[in-house]
Image (spheres, helix red, strand yellow):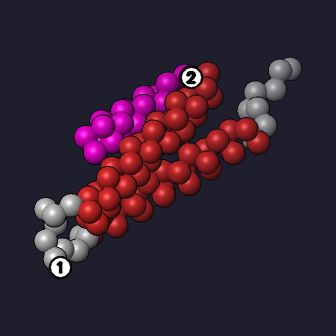
Amino acid sequence: MAISGFLGAMLLITILGLLFASYARQYKGWRTVASLLILHAACQIIGMVFISDLYNTSSRFYYGTKYDISFIFCILSSILDVVLAVGITVTAITSPPAYYPL
């Protein structure tokens, strides 16, 4: 989960950097943002899989333990990451170029 937090911070820095970058960097920056979104979602999903497996198999979780709201937020965050990455990629591939030579 710490890796996921680090990737999320890198993602925010990249998005802020692209806001103030030149047009050429903004045009090519979608790959970086989409890749970081997918990596962030993958790390969150792997972490949730480990927690779910330990919840079902480990004796450290006592009877009556329930998932908290943070577990649900993490799942929603990973789903949103994947949806945004697919949306950014589809938009970047299907959109026409913004510059037409004279």
Q: Is residue 2 left or right of residue 48?
A: left
Amino acid type for the residue under numbered disc 1: Gly
Give the Cα distance between marks 2 and 1. 52 Å
Residue 83, numbered label: none
Residue 25, numbered label: 2
Image location of residue 42, percent across then percent down = 44, 45
- Choose between 79 and 46: the one closer to the eye: 46
Which residue is at a point 86% across and 20% down the rendered structure image?
102
Marks 2 and 1 close (CB-CB < 8 Å): no
Quadrant occupied by the N terminus:
top left
Image location of residue 66, percent across then percent down = 22, 74
Which residue is at a point 56% across and 23% down the rendered structure image?
25
As for residue 21 lying within the magenta part, the answer is yes
Crowding at mark 1 (Cα within 10 Å: few <14, some 14-19, many 20+): few
Image location of residue 3, percent across then percent down = 30, 37
Which residue is at a point 38% across and 48% down the rendered structure image?
46
Which residue is at a point 42% across and 62% down the rendered structure image?
76
Q: Which residues are magenta?
A: 1-23
